[in-house]
Amino acid sequence: MKIVALAGGVGGAKLADGIYRLIPKVELTVIVNTGDDFTHFGLNISPDPDTVCYNLAGMENPETVWGRGSEQWETMDLVKKLGGPDWFSLGNRDLATHLERTRRLNEGEPLSKITCDFCETWGISASVLPMTDDLVPTLVKTDQGLLPFQEYFVKLGTKPEVNGFIFQDVESAKPAPGVLSEIEKADLVVICPSNPWVSIAPILSVPGIMEALKRKIVLAVSPIIGGEAVRGPAAKMYEEMGLQPSALSVAEGYDDLITGFILDQKDQALIKDIVSSFDGQIWILQADTWMKNRQDRIRLAGEVVIFGNQLIKEV
Ligand code: FO1
């Protein structure tokens, strides 16, 4: 079975990792958001591709889930002592990734090729594809003005009130090599429980990706459980954008795309509203979607894949 997963940061990386570790093995391609990418200390940082890769390689930091495990922070501490910016933490081990990626990008290599080579080095047998090799930085429209994503997210701790998002230059971006052909070959597409506003929307905005997905059986897993995001500002963003933070809002946001929707058991009461919002044209699975450990990731992935297989037969 061939699965394409769309993922952003931590939540997406966890489910992608669960799918990757399923037995029997599925052929997995993860298409990853690059809207969070930015330069810091002159280095090209690609947080979401790195979070996905580190998780698939089993090298993630278990506390933060972003960055690398067994990390040391001496370089950052010394930068701080010199008066440099310390709001975005780059660990000693993680820095090697940014240094080598920046060197190769400066030599003119595309991010997709560099990511593919890193995956090979790290022993990852899944394909991890950045959504595009072009620069599509996410800008957050807020009550404090237009903010680059990482300034909004990390520096200001998601405190500003959001009223919109810009995926800069996305109209002219091209899907990275392999993105459209992998979607074309997929038996099933899984939208991971990543932030719909700033992790999944940028992927869907790259010209050609939405059209390719519309020809597929697409499932989405809600990142909102009981009105709250497991992590990050997704619920706050729904509220500030004038929507109820709920699995219903998540499903409705994907209404022209999904065949199936997976929500948490806590949200059972929303099922009838979702079914009626989709005029009955939706398949719903309830599951325990909170992934607290690696076992949870694999269990949820198994349930999603079994559900997907049923839809492949039914639809
Ligand atoms: N997130 C934080 O909240 N604080 C950090 O200092 C931080 C550093 C960081 C370094 C490398 C990396 O790959 C990710 C990092 N993240 C950090 C996570 C990142 O900002 C977000 O998780 C994503 O961009 C949102 O998906």
Image: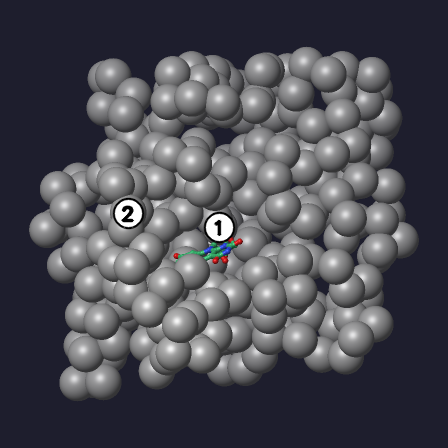
Q: Residues within 10 Å of mark 2 (few under 14, many from 20)?
A: some
Q: Residue sitting at 65 percent across and 24 percent down?
A: 263
> Is the shortest distance between ligand 1 and the CB of mark 1 under 8 Å?
yes
Q: Residues within 10 Å of mark 1 (few under 14, many from 20)?
A: many
The image quadrant where one finds the N terminus is: top left
Nearer-the-camera pick, 187 or 105: 105
Q: Amino acid at mark 1?
A: Gly
Q: In the rendered image, is residue 259 in sight?
A: no
230 lies left or right of 16:
right
Nearer-the-camera pick, 268 or 103: 103
Where disc 1 sits, the SS reads loop
Which residue, given by chain and number where applicable, does mark 2 sit on? 71
Location of residue 171 in the rendering, given as x and y in whole percent from the top left corner: 55, 78
Which residue, given by chain and number where applicable, does mark 1 sit on? 8
201 lies left or right of 78:
right
Location of residue 246 in the rendering, given as x and y in whole percent from the top left corner: 78, 35
Location of residue 304 in the rendering, given as x and y in whole percent from the top left corner: 48, 22
Nearer-the-camera pick, 167 or 274: 167
Nearer-the-camera pick, 34 or 67: 67
Q: Residue sitting at 76 percent across and 53 percent down?
A: 237
Q: Amino acid at mark 2?
A: Glu
The image quadrant where one finds the C terminus is: top right
Q: In the rendered image, is residue 214 in sight?
A: yes
Vertical placement of 217 versus 173: above or below? above
Location of residue 13 in the rendering, given as x and y in whole percent from the top left corner: 41, 40
Vertical placement of 270 versus 253: above or below? above
96 lies left or right of 229:
left
33 lies left or right of 122:
right
Q: Residue sitting at 29 percent across and 41 percent down?
A: 69
Residue lying at the far right of the rendered structure: 242
Q: Earlier in the sequence, mark 1 or mark 2?
A: 1
